């Protein structure tokens, strides 16, 4: 275990909650939540998982002249009794990787519950209210979260030969080790999947705030929501085709493939350039 875990310090936590998010996520929900928690609650990295066995290291990513390596970091928020694990998505050895995450949470800190965060692609428009969906790894945690109205009584089975989702696999691994938890999913408009979705990020933050009592200030994220709404509104005024496509979605009408592709491309182009 110690060969792959690099501890910088050992913050004092008492049966904390573990939250897990990923860098590659619809609407950048994981990075958005991670950055917001760090900025607002001053979280600090206390441990990392060494990447060698879990990520391809035969290439490199460079952004703005910076070399980016896959990172898997544990952040501590002692005042709120919270651990947030934020990571690139591992490519190999999922089971061993997840057990390293759980070793930190359980063997070092006796974590009481785990929540994984994720986005699901939806046909809603960007101004639609967001509701969290959830799947649970035990009846006990489902009952515990009943007041949050997360369950939609979803039925699903992985197709033969298919692979479970990353979060589902992690939640199953947690169950094997006696840790109760839930996967939280927020719908993200399909034309914002590759862009920040501050509404979706706020929905997840509000759940965590209510569950863990983080007492967050949402001023910054509310401003980003207003700014994004205003920019897309400006795009609609400039481009009747985009306005028509979003209005069709808002009235539950289907878009054809060309309309969907054009909406994604134009919203992406406009928001990145503005």
Image: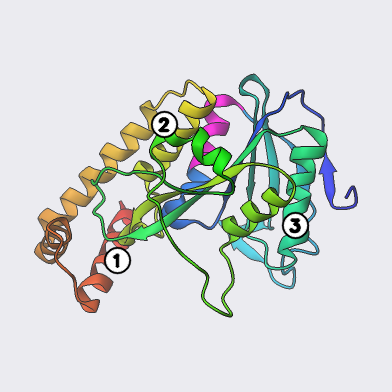
User: Helix, strand, or loop for circle 2?
Assistant: helix
Q: Quadrant of residue 60?
A: bottom right
Residue ID at (23%, 44%): 229
- Give the residues drawn in magenta, as a range: 33-42
| Label 3: few (<14), some (14–19) or many (≥20) C-alpha neighbours in 10 Å | many
**Badges 3 and 1: C-beta atoms under 8 Å apart?**
no
Q: Earlier in the sequence, mark 3 or mark 1?
A: 3
Q: Residue tagged by mark 1?
A: 264
Q: Earlier in the sequence, mark 2 or mark 3?
A: 3
Q: Quadrant of residue 104?
A: top right
Picture coordinates of residue 20, whole percent (x, y)? 60, 45
From the viewer's perspective, is the residue at label 2 or at label 3 nearer?
A: 2
| Label 1: few (<14), some (14–19) or many (≥20) C-alpha neighbours in 10 Å | some
Q: CA distance from mark 2 to mark 3?
A: 32 Å
Would residue 37 be counted in the magenta stretch? Answer: yes
Residue ID at (67%, 36%): 75
**Viewer-nearest residue: 192 or 96:** 96
User: Quick check: 225 above or below 154?
Assistant: above
Q: Is residue 8 visible?
A: no
Q: CA distance from mark 2 to mark 1?
A: 36 Å
Pick out the residue farthest to the bottom.
161
Q: Indicate which disc residue 97 carries.
A: 3
Residue ID at (17%, 49%): 233
Q: Residue tagged by mark 2?
A: 147
Would residue 7 be counted in the magenta stretch? Answer: no
């Amino acid at each position: 275990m110690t060969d792959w875990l690099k501890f910088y310090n050992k913050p004092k936590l008492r049966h904390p909650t573990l939250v897990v998010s990923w860098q590659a996520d619809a609407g950048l929900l994981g990075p958005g939540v991670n950055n917001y928690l760090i900025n607002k609650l001053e979280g600090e990295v206390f441990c990392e998982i060494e990447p060698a066995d879990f990520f391809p290291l035969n290439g490199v990513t460079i952004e703005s002249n910076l070399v980016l390596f896959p990172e898997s970091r544990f952040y501590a928020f002692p005042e709120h009794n919270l651990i947030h694990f934020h990571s690139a998505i591992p490519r190999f050895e999922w089971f061993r990787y997840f057990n390293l995450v759980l070793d930190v949470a359980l063997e070092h800190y006796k974590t009481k519950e785990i929540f994984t965060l994720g986005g699901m692609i939806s046909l809603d428009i960007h101004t639609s209210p967001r509701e969290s969906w959830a799947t649970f790894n035990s009846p006990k945690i489902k009952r515990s979260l009943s007041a949050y109205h997360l369950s939609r009584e979803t039925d699903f089975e992985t197709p033969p030969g298919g692979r479970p989702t990353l979060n589902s696999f992690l939640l199953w691994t947690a169950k094997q080790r006696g840790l109760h938890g839930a996967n939280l999913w927020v719908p993200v408009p399909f034309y914002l999947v590759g862009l920040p979705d501050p509404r979706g990020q706020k929905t997840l933050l509000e759940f965590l705030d209510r569950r863990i009592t983080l007492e967050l200030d949402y001023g910054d994220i509310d401003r980003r929501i207003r700014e994004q709404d205003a920019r897309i509104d400006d795009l609609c005024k400039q481009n009747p085709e985009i306005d028509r496509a979003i209005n069709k979605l808002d009235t539950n009408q289907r878009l054809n493939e060309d309309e969907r592709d054009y909406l994604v491309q134009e919203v992406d182009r406009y928001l990145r350039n503005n």
